[in-house]
Image (cartoon, rainbow, N blue to C red):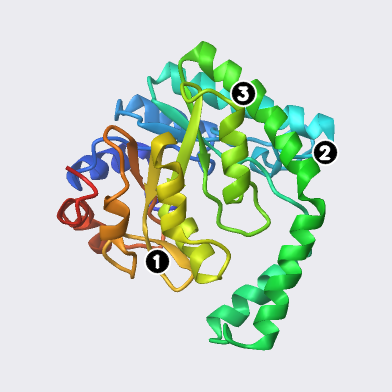
Amino acid sequence: MWAKGRFSHMAGFAAKVRELGFSHIEPNALVGPEMLSELLKTKVPVSSIHSPCPVVSSSRGIPATSLSLSSLNLSERLEAISFAKKTIDLAADVSARAIVLHMGEVPIDLSLQDRLHKLYDGGYVQTTEYRDAKEGLIHQRLSSAQSYVDAASKSLRELGEYGRQKGIMLGLETRFYFNEIPNMDEMAGLLDEVSEHVAGYWHDVGHAEVQQQLGFSLHEEWLSRFKDRMVGIHLHDIRGISDHHAPGNGNMNWEMIAKYLPQGIVKVCEIGEWNDEEQTQGVIKFLQKKGILD
């Protein structure tokens, strides 16, 4: 993520990764085929891969990232599955431990969701307008979610079997937007669908914190409820509901997070491209000080 638009060639990125003290990288859905080829030639170890990777156009003429594993359109869902399988293949080829999955979304009035975020940023959380927007979102999502969650579950079962054959774990990620799948109860249901040896929970600290800031769910409850199924974590800082800041440059409660992290999980710093190099230089030492890294 941090490499986006920053390096003319991925050899420069790999060198900077090592200089900053990071041991591995996570290619994500911003990485195209040429960029991926350059990355792999550097031989920098790959911890995990954020699906779909590499990103290419789908048969629908839209990026593979726009396809949904929860789509009620069977052809779209099957194509989304096929791209996720290609990511699993890539993970197996480069000896990564896991892939990160977005499981889809529930179609709602996105303008209402945008309105909620603007009200939060404007300091109107305690207003009737904010409460009405929030309740409207909850009602919209609840009234139509089940069929999309069922479709996501079908996708997960197929991908879980494929991942098992390839020896790659699937990490179901906490999502940023309220309409995205899964919410907390949906996460529990999806994880119940598959073996702990096939898929697990991927905690995103920023996404969970945003859900708490907006009043939808508690960050600590995500951690306490799914710590025993956690396979990996995305680490970044937050300011209000703006995430992906370099750790140490925001208001994240790192001490709370450190209490719940199991041994041996994949830990990835998912730092936005707008963070300058100076902000990333102290990240490793900061996370060590907070007990997140050994």
Q: Which residue is mark 1?
A: 238
**x, y (%) of residue 66?**
69, 44
Which numbered disc flags the more N-terminal residue, 2 or 3?
2
What residue is rendered at 26% in x and 57% in y? 280
Q: Which mark is residue 159?
A: 3
Q: Amino acid at mark 2?
A: Leu
x then y, percent, for residue 196: 48, 25
User: Mark 3 or mark 1: which comes first in sequence?
Assistant: 3
Measure the C-alpha gap from mark 3 to mark 1: 32 Å
Q: Secondary structure at mark 3?
A: helix
Q: Which residue type carries mark 1?
A: Ile
Q: Badge 2: few (under 14), some or many (20 or more) residues near its Cα, within 10 Å?
A: some
Q: Are marks 2 and 3 in contact (CB under 8 Å)?
A: no
Q: Residue beneath label 2, please?
A: 72
Q: Which residue is rendered at x = 64% and y = 42% of the image?
A: 65
In the image, is 71 to the left or to the right of 282? Answer: right
Q: Are marks 2 and 1 in contact (CB under 8 Å)?
A: no
- Up-down relation of residue 292 to residue 132 (above or below): above
- Give the residue type at disc 3: Leu
Q: Quadrant of residue 206?
A: bottom left
* Residue nearest the observer in this picture, 166 or 187: 187
Q: Earlier in the sequence, mark 2 or mark 1?
A: 2
* Mark number displayed over residue 164: none
Q: Is residue 74 above or below residue 213?
A: above
The crowd level at tag 3 (other Cα within 10 Å; few <14, some 14-19, many 20+) is many
- Please state the horizontal and vertical placement of residue 103, each as a whole percent of the image: 63, 40
Disc 2 and disc 1: Cα gap in Å? 34 Å
The percent position of residue 116, horizontal first and vertical second, equals 65, 75
Left or right of 239 in this view: 19: left
Question: Badge 1 local density, few (<14 within 10 Å), some, or many (20+)?
Answer: many
**Residue at the extreme top of the image, as rendered:** 165
Q: CA distance from mark 2 to mark 3?
A: 17 Å
